Structures are given as C-alpha cells and as structure tokens.
Amino acid sequence: MASDPKMIPQTGLLSADANQAAALAAYGGVLTVDLDAVIANWRKLEKTAVPAECAAVIKADGYGCGAGQVAQALAKAGCKTFFVATIEEARTVREAVPEITIYVLGGYFQNTGEHYAKINCRPVIGDLNELAEWDVFCRRTGWSGGAAIHVDTGMNRLGLTLAEAQAIIPRINAGDHGIALVMSHLVSAEQLNNPANAKQLAAFRGIASEFSGVPATLANSSGVFLGAAFQFDIVRPGAALYGVNPTPEADNPMQPVVDLKARIVQIRNVERGETVGYGGTWTARRPTKLAIIAVGYADGYFRAASSNDGTRGAEVVVAGKRCPIAGRISMDLIAIDITDLPPNAARRGHMVTLLGDGITVDELAHHFGTIGYEVLTSLGRRYARVYKGGHEVAPLTKPEPTQAAEQPSSPPSTEQPTAPPPLPS
C-alpha cells in the first residue's frame, strides 16, 4: 500500500505501518484509491473494445483519484495512450510516466508550442485558427510531435465543423501532415437507444474515412458499450475507469475504486423534540444518539445530501450498518443518527464509511443531485490519500509550473521541415 508522500510523513522511529497509522490519525478523513480496481476496469474495457486500442482519460487529476498514480498503474498494465485537459495536467502525467502518448483535449493556443514540445505531448485541435498557429510553430521549430483533429458531430462545443474538416482533406491526402488522430465526442452515449448516437456515428464514420491512414476515436466510457461500430481504432474511457457506471440502464460492470472514511469526533445525545444543525430543519422524534464526523461540504461531500423533517438524506456506514444523516451538512462536520446501533458500537475516534462498503459513487451522486463524475472530481484535498495495489506506484514529485508565455530559448530543432499544404481560405 502506497501513500501520497505529501500527506503521510515518515519518521525513522517507527515501522512503516506504525508511521502510517500515526499520520492518518491527524486527518479527519481518509480517501483510499484502489489502483488494482482501476487496472481491472481498464482491462474490462480493453476486452470489450478488442481489437481497438484502449486509452485512458485521466484529466481533472485522474477524476480526483490522482493522475500521476493512475497513469503509472495503467502504464504498467499496458495502457499506452492518455488524454488530459490541460498542459499542466500533461506535465504531471509526463513526470510520472515518461514513455507514453499524451493528448491535451483543451486545444492549442498561440505561444504554447514550446510547452507541448518540451514534454512531448499532442494538442487536440478543434479550430482552423488553432491549426494555423500549430503549423506556424511546427514550421519555425521543426517540431514533428503530432496533433489530433477534433471534429464536431453534434456536441456543439469544441471541434471543426464537418465542412471545415472536409476542407482539410487535401492536406491529409498530400502526406506529411502531422495529424496523428481524428476524434469526435458522443452526446448521449449512456442512452443506448438515443437516435443521436446513430446520427453522430454516421457523420463521424463519413469524415474519418477520408482521413486516410489516420487512426480514429469516437467512444467514451459509455460509447465502448454501444458496440463495435462505435469503437474505431481507439476508445477513450474516463469515468468508468474510476467505478462510475457507464451503462446506467443496466447493472454497473465496473469495480468500485474509491473508499472514503471519516473520523467520529464526538458522540452526543439529544432529547426528543430538539433540532440538529443549521436552520433547525431536522427534529429528533425520539431520544437520539448522534455521531459527529469530521467531513463536510468543504471536503466535497455536498450539502444537497442533507436531511430534514420531510426528506431523508444520504446514509453512512457506521460499525457495519447504514445510518442516516441528521440535519444539514455543514462545511466541516456531519451529524449521523446512530441510535439503532448497539451500545458502544461507535466511539470517538472510530472511522465511518461515506463511500464504499456498498455505497457507490452513483448512489452518492443521486443524493448530491448530480453525476458520479462531479462526485469524484469534487473530493477535497483535506483527506489523507492512500493508494493500494497498482504494483505499488512510486512517489511522485511535483513538476515545475509552465511559464505564462512561450520563451523559445532553444527550439526543439533548427531543421526546417517541408511546409504542410496551406489551410483552406
């Protein structure tokens, strides 16, 4: 079991296990990420997508699970291609795993070329202006690291229009174009019978077929389960890797990845008729025993999961039994009704489970009024973070921040390549 070195300090006076136990005692909550489960989920997706390559989306710090640790584990398992959102995220992943392919979904901005070249990652280009700026950088420096083209087939968010994509086909056919991937993104892949899926598939198949020799990718987590027609050369699952159900109309085929526990800081009794928490919205209907735990909405446990006199909120596992939240969730604390537990089953200092032990990411998302993606990416930084499995990932060092603007002190190469065919006017 490996721990985040910034969160779990070590001393030379105790054993490793004793050091970890002592360090964890200083935190109100412990977030455990099961890297073996991440690997198992990736292999499940890989098997489903054969013969397509299975990449991994690890943006937003690996959906809150730690991008560097997840990248190390998946790379050791055989994953070769990763997607992130920003150059900074790419730097973190490159620091963790030197020999992989990284695509940056956020696109290319003028004066960022040196940063892409320095860490050898590829921008996902979704606008003709971006493509022109990328070409200028490549001509000036000789950089030939490649880029992806994003084509919009219905999301209306990022991407070249179909007409714009069609207009650059002559450039692709001319060769030496530097385009390593063509991609689009599904709007409603989690809905098996949504007609948007077939419409997007037809549009993407048509344009991708004209990008001769360029690998294509369309399927996200849910798209993997839409069938072989959607899988093309590469699939790029994200949330499913971390245990979110990619098939909400059926049972979840993924293993849970995250376990979240919080510490009881106080046990107290309230009389029948007394209220609990801000606003006094929850009233004890009997003499009630409460456990107060050291996690709140500042830690990513949403206030929307509160309970009141008319609505039951989320539940927490205490001493092996589900117990309801009592009253409003506050910034740092939650009250749990433990009246039905045996005497002394829960004590000050004991840990309770907020996520895990049968409480899934998707269940918590329901109580939060959101989706599993937001639950995972909202998990706070006040937890002690513990990693288990994954062939014991190595401790990570934080990379130096990028500069705000391009300062080409030494370009990647002085060799000038043959200029690619001009963009359409």
Image (cartoon, rainbow, N blue to C red):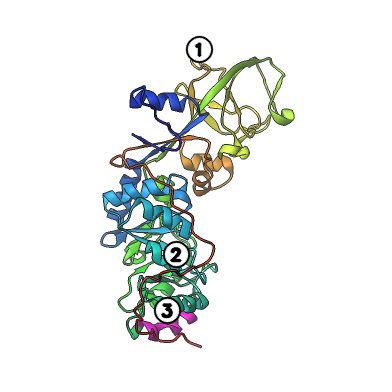
* Magenta segment: 163-172
Label 3: which residue? 140
Query: Depth check: 47 or 349 in front?
Result: 349
State how many labels appear. Answer: 3
Identify the mark nearer the N-term, 1 or 3: 3
Residue lying at the far right in this picture: please name it: 279
Identify the mark nearer the N-term, 2 or 3: 2
Q: Residue at x 28, y 41 (%)?
A: 391
Residue 308 placed where, x, y %? Answer: 67, 31
Using residue 351 as the reference point, say whether residue 219 is left or right of it. Answer: left
Residue 292 placed where, x, y %? Answer: 59, 23
From what the image shows, is residue 29 above or below residue 42? above
Please, what is the three-letter code of the amino acid marked with disc 2? His
Label 2: which residue? 115
Residue lying at the far bottom in this picture: please name it: 425
Task: Give the distance between the C-alpha atoms of the residues marked 1 and 3, in whole angstroms.
Answer: 72 Å
Label 1: which residue? 344
Please, what is the three-letter code of the amino acid marked with disc 3? Arg
Comparing labels 1 and 3, the label whose residue is closer to the camera: 3
CA neighbours of label 2 inside 10 A, class few (<14), some (14 to 19), many (20+): many
